[in-house]
Image (cartoon, rainbow, N blue to C red):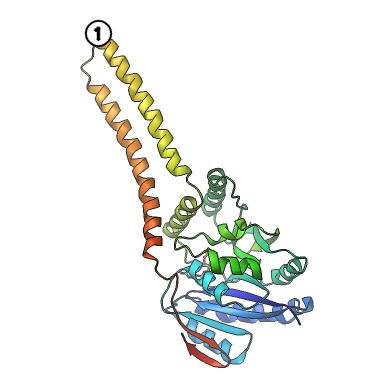
Amino acid sequence: MAKKLSIVVSVYNEALGLHQFYEHTNQVLTNDFAKTGWDYELIFVNDGSQDDSLEILREFASKDDHVKVVNFAANRGHEAAMIAGIDYSTGDAVVCMDADLQHPPESLADMACKFDEGYDVISMIRTARKDAGLIKRITSWGFYKVMNKLSGKTKFENNSSDFFGISRRVALVLKKDYRERVRFLRGYVQNVGFRKTTLEFEASSRIAGESNYNIKSLIALSLNAICNFSDAPLKMGIYAGLVSLVAAFILMIYSIVQYFLGTAPDGYSTIIVLLCFMFGVLFIILGFVSEYLAIIFAEVKNRPIYIVDSVITKDGEELQ
Ligand code: UDP
Ligand code: MG
């Protein structure tokens, strides 16, 4: 029996470009991809879109039995959508991709071949980034540099993206063991181990609409990622605290000596310097402690990562 690739596409307010995405992807899947001998399913996860995305997805599902739509009850974010897609996948391998054609479906055939060769994890690496301006490129480069410095044994591919492929057994690990609320999915994917390879792709510009990630959500994602994979910030706080203690101690000796020599200054500057320094260190530590606290809080609440409203296939709509 032919192997089946589950293609997970997260959709949030993509009505403008969805038809183009579907037509283009379908064309690739029925031509180049078909030559690999793989079968496929297209799982669209509608992440609580407020535009006509759901209606358009319904239309795809009604005429194409490769299509399954997992419809969220509310917007939960890209990562939750990918996790849901992986949960609902039934294939021998799963690929996650965006709905805006920034991740070329042309790569799917190559990915299928890599799975045939026995690889479990395929990281897709962006080469050219027509999608991103200079600032985004620099921050993304800086992010991976910092991540790799901080995270010890776990390593992240530079320029990796939310475009990746995983075999059934990796998908099962993600389904079963990686149910954290504060997540960095591409980090898990790259670090579960198994047989790993990379493929390159050229990220093109969005076909329609605007990027849903803004500076704020990117900072949030980066902070999550760093605090999830590394306790370096906590340790950094402790080291900074130690250094400040030593400095304060030296200052103290200095002022005692000055006192006995009778050349004691009025002490004002010492106090100010000390205060600033200690408070600075204290706040850094406090900031990181609260970051971890926030993660613990999120885990303890134990809320569902997503809530599915319905699943739509050619056979009809099944409320969950
Ligand atoms: N997306 C989602 N939920 C969200 C935001 C985005 O499912 O809350 C989807 C979106 O429809 C797209 C993918 O995630 O398919 C990547 O989003 P986007 O293109 O806005 O991000 P960028 O490519 O600019 O990083
Ligand atoms: Mg995009």
Rendering quarter of residue 74: bottom left
Question: Could you tell me which secondary element the residue under label 1 belongs to?
Answer: helix
Name above or below for residue 133 compared with residue 210: above
Three-letter code, disc 1:
Phe
How far from the left and from the top, in percent, is residue 88?
56, 77
Q: Residue at x 68, y 80 (%)?
A: 40
Q: Nearer the viewer, residue 103 or 95?
A: 95
Q: Which residue is painted at 57% across and 93% down in the image?
A: 315
Image quarter of the N terminus: bottom right
Q: In the image, is residue 115 above or below residue 292?
A: below
65 versus 216 height, above or below: below
Residue 110 visible: yes
> Quick one: which residue is furthest to the top in this view?
261
Mark 1 — residue? 260
Can see residue 104?
Answer: no
108 vs 237, left or right, is right
Q: Is residue 3 left or right of residue 68?
A: right
